[in-house]
Amino acid sequence: MGEQLTEGDVKRITDEINHRKLVERPQILKELKAARAQGDLSENFEYYAAKRANNQNNSRIRYLEKMLRFAEVISDESKDDEVGLNNTVDVYFEDDDCTETYRIVTSIRGNSLKGLISNESPLGKALLKHKVGDRVEVKVSPEVSYYVKITRLDKTGESEDDKIKQF
């Protein structure tokens, strides 16, 4: 089974594929043709740079198409008072006596440095389907766990900062 993606993730990936095919690929091929026309290819840096850019672009397109082909599309719908995908939550960590804010996203968008945690991470799994005020056990392994409390839930859509053009 492949990655779990929401409809929004599928749209973003499709948009990136189209951009790479319709905008970047023609530009790269134009640069490749111009570099080839310069003559001797054995010491032509522009030719090798354009060839490398073309290979990277084509590789990225294949990767994204394969991701879509094997993806499991999941819903980001949840009850109004429950934590779900694309929701922002404030979480109080009892052991550390601190509160942190996270948005729960699919694994391909996860980025802990930006406060985006995966629905497949131990914390993401534990928070899903819980409500504000719930004390939740986060199991890191069969022997290790810790407790957090959900202090706030924001069900609004994505902010501009969360929109990722490239996966």
Image (spheres, rainbow, N blue to C red):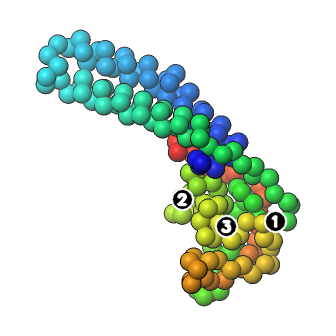
Q: Residue furthest front?
A: 1
On residue 82, which mark appears? 1
Q: Residue at 70% of width from left, 62% of height from top?
A: 88
Task: Residue 64 in the image: state x and y as whole percent.
Answer: 52, 37
Q: Quadrant of residue 86?
A: bottom right
Q: Residue 2, how many percent across, how many down?
A: 58, 47
In this rendering, position of residue 82 left or right of residue 162: right
User: What residue appears at the point 25 percent right and 18 percent down from the top-left corner?
Assistant: 35
Label 3 crowd bin: few (<14), some (14–19), many (20+), radius 10 Å: some
State if disc 3 and disc 2 touch (CB < 8 Å).
no
Q: Which of disc 2 and disc 1 is earlier in sequence?
A: 1
How far apart are the two marked residues, 2 and 3, measured between alpha carbons?
15 Å
Amino acid marked by disc 2: Asn
Q: Secondary structure at mark 2?
A: loop
In which image quadrant can residue 153 be found?
bottom right
Mark 1 or 3: in front is 3
Seen in the image, is 145 located left or right of residue 33? Answer: right
Numbered badge on residue 125 = 3
Mark 1 crowdedness (10 Å alpha carbons): few <14, some 14-19, many ≥20 = some
Q: CA distance from mark 1 to mark 2?
A: 22 Å
Q: Secondary structure at mark 1?
A: loop
Give the residue at mark 2. 111
Residues packed near mark 2 inside 10 Å, few (<14), some (14 to 19) or many (20 plus)? few
Residue type (three-letter) at the residue carrying disc 1:
Glu
Q: Is residue 148 left or right of residue 164?
A: right
Q: What secondary structure is found at the residue carrying circle 3?
A: helix
Q: Is residue 63 above or below residue 128?
A: above
109 and 65: which one is in front? 65
Mark 2 vs mark 3: in front: 3
**Residue at point 59% right, 36% down?**
69
Residue 138 locus on image (x, y percent): 64, 77
